[in-house]
Structures are given as C-alpha cells and as structure tokens.
Amino acid sequence: MEGGSLNDGTTQVNAKLLQSFQKSFVQVQSILDQNRLLINEINQNHESKIPDNLSRNVGLIRELNGNIRRVVALYADLSSSFCRSMESSSDGDSSLRSSDGKSGMKRVRPL
C-alpha cells in the first residue's frame, strides 16, 4: 500500500466530516434565524396587550423552546462527532501514546 492512498483516505474522511459540520451549522443558523422572527413577534404581541395576541404568545413561546432544544441537540451531536473524530485521528498518532501504549488524551464524556 502506498502512503498516498492513506492520505487520500484521511482527506476524504476530513472532507466528509467538514461537510457534516457545515450541514449542522447551516441547520443551527436556520433555526436561530427563525427564533429571531419568533422573538420579534412575541415582543410585538406583548407590547400590543391585545388578549388574542397575548394568548398566541403561549404557542409561539412553546415553538421557541422547541427550537432551542433542537439547537442544543445539534450542538451536542456536533460535539460528539468532533470528539469521536479527534479520538480516531489520534489513534494513529504514536506521538500521543505513552510508553505503555495507552493514549495520552483523555476521553470527554457528555454531561
């Protein structure tokens, strides 16, 4: 096996990982843009003090909370993916291993 093919594999993995991260960040940005619109509408309804508008805010706030949960989940997935990619990339790096062969990096566990 040539050294170039290993680099090509690493490049493909890195490109795929970068594409996955970019997709997640686009999703997050889309949700945050939607949240901005929801917050503006909630503020307008609150300032109007019209009973129908105020009752509509209940649903809008629920939607906003759901969106925030989605953003948190996306960031958690991104964090896990990043940690896994760092662990797998360090598996091949002997400079990160101690004399007993164990990795010198600590595993990060989600809370």
Image (cartoon, rainbow, N blue to C red):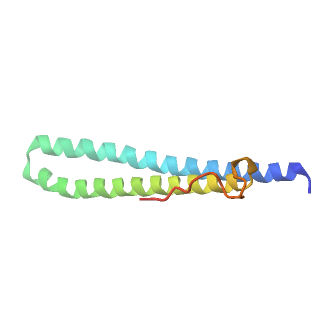
Residue for point 18% across, 53% down = 57
Q: Is residue 64 left or right of residue 42?
A: right
Quadrant location of the N terminus? bottom right
Residue for point 46% across, 56% down = 76
Q: Is residue 71 left or right of residue 64?
A: right
Q: Nearer the viewer, residue 47 or 77?
A: 77
Residue 95 at x, y percent in the picture: 73, 47
Residue 75 at x, y percent in the picture: 46, 52
Q: Nearer the viewer, residue 88 or 57?
A: 88
Residue 27 at x, y percent in the picture: 48, 51
The residue furthest front is 99
Residue 41 at x, y percent in the picture: 23, 45
Quadrant location of the C terminus? bottom left
Q: Is residue 12 left or right of residue 6?
A: left
Residue for point 55% across, 57% down = 107
Q: Nearer the viewer, residue 40 or 105?
A: 105
Residue for point 11% across, 54% down = 52
Q: Is residue 70 left or right of residue 16?
A: left
